[in-house]
Image: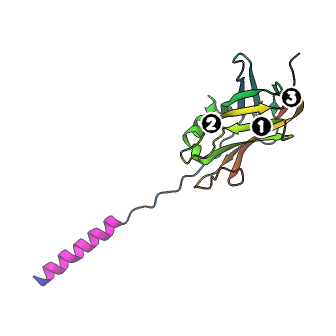
Amino acid sequence: MKNKFKFLAFAALLVGSISACKKDELPHVHEEELITTVTLRFTNTANANDVVTVTARDIDGDGGNAPVIGALNLRPNTTYNWSVTQILDESESPAEDVREEIVEENYEHLLVYTATPANLITVNITDRDRNNLPVGLTGTATTTTAGTGTLRVTLKHQPNGTKNGTAAPGSTDFEFTFPLNVVNPI
């Protein structure tokens, strides 16, 4: 009887230890995509027919040929609703829609907008992730008086809880600098 009890106890212990062992889940690995194309659309809040679309394209990525970046021409003293309409990897066929991944994983991404000179345009981000931190796919922009400068757009990948609403943490997935012209149309 004692041997049977010892055997059952040993069997229960063995089954318990085997079933308690489970493989650790592998951490989410972010495979960095090649981002070749970014398109922004600015719509004048006072005139919905006044729409400006600008695209930056770098088909071969870093190195190789220089990117082709359109000029962003906006009116002075005007407020725009803006959105990032495309973020593509056109090295794939068909082109991969990276914007969709950013929407799905918005808690790991931040688009940062830096104007030079800083007083030429004010860019506000209106979309938020599940932690109420900015994402940067939509917003408003207000120009000041006429002038020229640049608007740098940077996509930061901020995984594993590093996203804090600032540009500091994480790695840069892309960065394009658009020439910015705030001028009255001719």
- State whether the magenta stretch is mostly helix, strand or loop: helix
Range of residues picked out in magenta = 3-20
Mark 2 or 3 closer to N-term?
2
Label 2 crowd (10 A; few <14 / some 14-19 / many >=20): many
Placement of the C terminus among the 4 image quadrants: top right
Which residue is the site of mark 2? Answer: 98
Foreground residue among 17 and 138: 138
Q: What amino acid does circle 1 point to?
A: Thr
In the rendered image, residue 98, in percent from the top left (x then y), is placed at 62, 36
Mark 2 vs mark 3: in front: 3
Q: Is residue 91 visible?
A: no
CB contact under 8 Å: marks 2 and 3:
no
Above or below — where is 15 with respect to 39?
below
In the rendered image, residue 122, in percent from the top left (x then y), is placed at 77, 37
The residue positioned 9% from the left and 82% from the top of the image is 1
Q: Spatial distance from mark 2 to mark 3, Cα to Cα?
A: 28 Å
Above or below — where is 29 with respect to 94?
below
Mark 1 or 3 closer to N-term?
1
Label 3 crowd (10 A; few <14 / some 14-19 / many >=20): some
In the rendered image, residue 40, in percent from the top left (x then y), is placed at 71, 29
Which residue is the site of mark 1? Answer: 122
Q: What amino acid does circle 2 point to?
A: Val
